[in-house]
Image (spheres, helix red, strand yellow):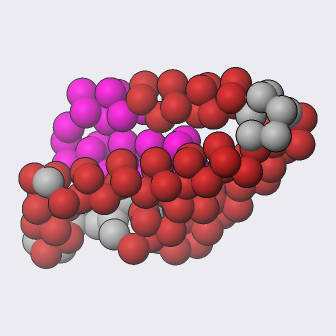
């Protein structure tokens, strides 16, 4: 779970949505994975549009990071966290390792900065 929190905090909506969706897929819940992917995409589009408001980039970057982190923690604290823990305790594989988390997060961070620079 710490990997998902790090990715969500530094990568933003799309990274948080991707990691949460992967956990749902690992738990054989594809409907929830699709729903999370939709929400993450909407959040990212809203972020991209709102960055074009002059002087708002830093505020929206902060809100994006905090919003992503809250989404991940909310998912984990509820019944879904229990399912993830049960999967890991039974010897189930994690959807991703630290290398994948860091690579995806860095790519998303660069893309977020490019969008911010354009706006």
* Vertical placement of residue 27 versus 84, above or below: above
Q: Position of residue 81 (x, y in %)?
A: 18, 60
Residue 72 relative to residue 57: left or right: left
Q: Nearer the viewer, residue 74 or 99?
A: 74
Is 68 included in the stretch rendered in magenta? no
Q: Nearer the viewer, residue 70 or 111?
A: 70
* Vertical placement of residue 46 versus 59, above or below: above
Q: Residue at x 20, y 49 (%)?
A: 27
Residue 26 visible somewhere in the drawing: no
Residue 115 relative to residue 8: left or right: right
Quadrant containing the N terminus is bottom left
Name of the residue lying farthest toward the right? 118
Q: Position of residue 116 (x, y in %)?
A: 81, 42
Q: Residue at x 89, y 35 (%)?
A: 118
Q: Position of residue 60 (x, y in %)?
A: 65, 43
Q: Quadrant of residue 54?
A: top right
Per the picture, the main secondary structure of the magenta-coloured stretch is helix
Q: Which residues are magenta?
A: 12-37
Is 31 included in the stretch rendered in magenta? yes
Q: Residue at x 39, y 74 (%)?
A: 2
Q: Position of residue 36 (x, y in %)?
A: 36, 34
Circle count: 0
Quadrant containing the C terminus is top right
Name of the residue lying farthest toward the front? 55
Q: Nearer the viewer, residue 76 or 58?
A: 58
Residue 52 visible somewhere in the drawing: yes
* Vertical placement of residue 48 versus 86, above or below: above
Residue 90 relative to residue 99: left or right: left
Q: Residue at x 29, y 43 (%)?
A: 25
């Amino acid at each position: 779970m710490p990997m998902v929190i790090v990715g969500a905090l530094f990568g933003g909506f799309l990274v948080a949505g991707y990691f949460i969706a992967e956990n749902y897929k690992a738990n054989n819940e594809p409907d929830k994975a699709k729903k999370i992917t939709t929400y993450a995409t909407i959040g990212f589009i809203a972020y991209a549009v709102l960055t074009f408001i002059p002087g708002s980039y830093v505020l929206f970057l902060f809100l994006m990071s905090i919003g992503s982190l809250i989404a991940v923690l909310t998912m984990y604290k509820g019944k879904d966290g229990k399912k993830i823990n049960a999967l890991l305790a039974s010897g189930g594989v994690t959807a991703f390792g630290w290398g994948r988390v860091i690579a995806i997060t860095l790519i998303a961070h660069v893309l977020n900065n490019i969008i911010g620079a354009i706006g």
